[in-house]
Amino acid sequence: AQRVTQPEKLLSVFKGAPVELKCNYSYSGSPELFWYVQYSRQRLQLLLRHISRESIKGFTADLNKGETSFHLKKPFAQEEDSAMYYCALSGAGSYQLTFGKGTKLSVIP
Amino acid sequence: NAGVTQTPKFQVLKTGQSMTLQCAQDMNHNSMYWYRQDPGMGLRLIYYSASEGTTDKGEVPNGYNVSRLNKREFSLRLESAAPSQTSVYFCASRAGEVRGYTFGSGTRLTVV
């Protein structure tokens, strides 16, 4: 079974402060991990994939297989980062994408 | 290039009524998905279709049926709507294993 845990429902930070959104996963094989972002009442948009090791909108995420984590980080939060963030996992060869319950990020001006 | 298109965007149903949510993608993706999004629950998979002609249950399939009409279209049907099915429904598609999913804009369904 595959499971994704996002321990924080809500995270509030001040503009310019560092941000870390936590994601832990449970999967016995090699997972494919994603971060999705959903701005108010909009569709989910892919933010990052762990295999591409890219930085989008200043966000980065590193897969830590030892700690089974895929935390999302940004050094300096901006007001436009306020949104709902979902961590998601797909197992190798699986067609299913399992989401965490999401973390609402609120950036205070 | 529209991506994933869902209709309708909003719908109010009375308990016991039926309706079909439509989803179409123009990216030639093989797999398509239906999720429901509820506060505090994240997104939960209802049904998916790995390829044209196949459908499989996800995490919360009870009360729903699906049809993969062709490679482009994947519909979700509520035969007898219940208040517990009040939710936002998202359709998604995926080209292959190493690419991310593309989501539609959602259907906000209220069952009264």
Image: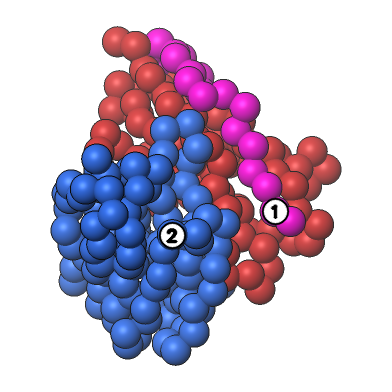
Chain colours: A red, B blue
**Residue at image point 54% right, 47% down:** A99
Tell me: A7 left or right of B27: right
Coordinates of residue B40 in the picture (x, y in percent):
48, 31
Residue identifier under label 2: B63
Coordinates of residue B36 in the picture (x, y in percent):
41, 50
Is residue A59 placed above or below B10 in the rendered structure?
Answer: above
Is residue A69 placed above or below A49 in the rendered structure?
Answer: above
**Residue at image point 50% right, 61% down:** B61
A76 and B110: which one is in front? B110
Circle 1: element type:
loop
- Count the marks: how many? 2
B5 and B47: which one is in front? B47
Tell me: A24 left or right of B47: right
Disc 2 residue type (three-letter): Gly
Could you tell me which chain the residue with mark 1 belongs to?
A: A
Q: Residues within 10 Å of mark 2 (few under 14, many from 20)?
A: some
Disc 1 residue type (three-letter): Gln
A11 and A81: which one is in front? A11
Q: Residues within 10 Å of mark 1 (few under 14, many from 20)?
A: some
Residue identifier under label 1: A2
Coordinates of residue A82 in the picture (x, y in percent):
34, 26
**Residue at image point 57% right, 24% down:** A8
> Quick check: can you spot residue B55?
yes
The segment highlighted magenta reads: A1-20
Residue B38 is labelled as none
Coordinates of residue A39 in the picture (x, y in percent):
30, 37
Circle 2: element type:
loop
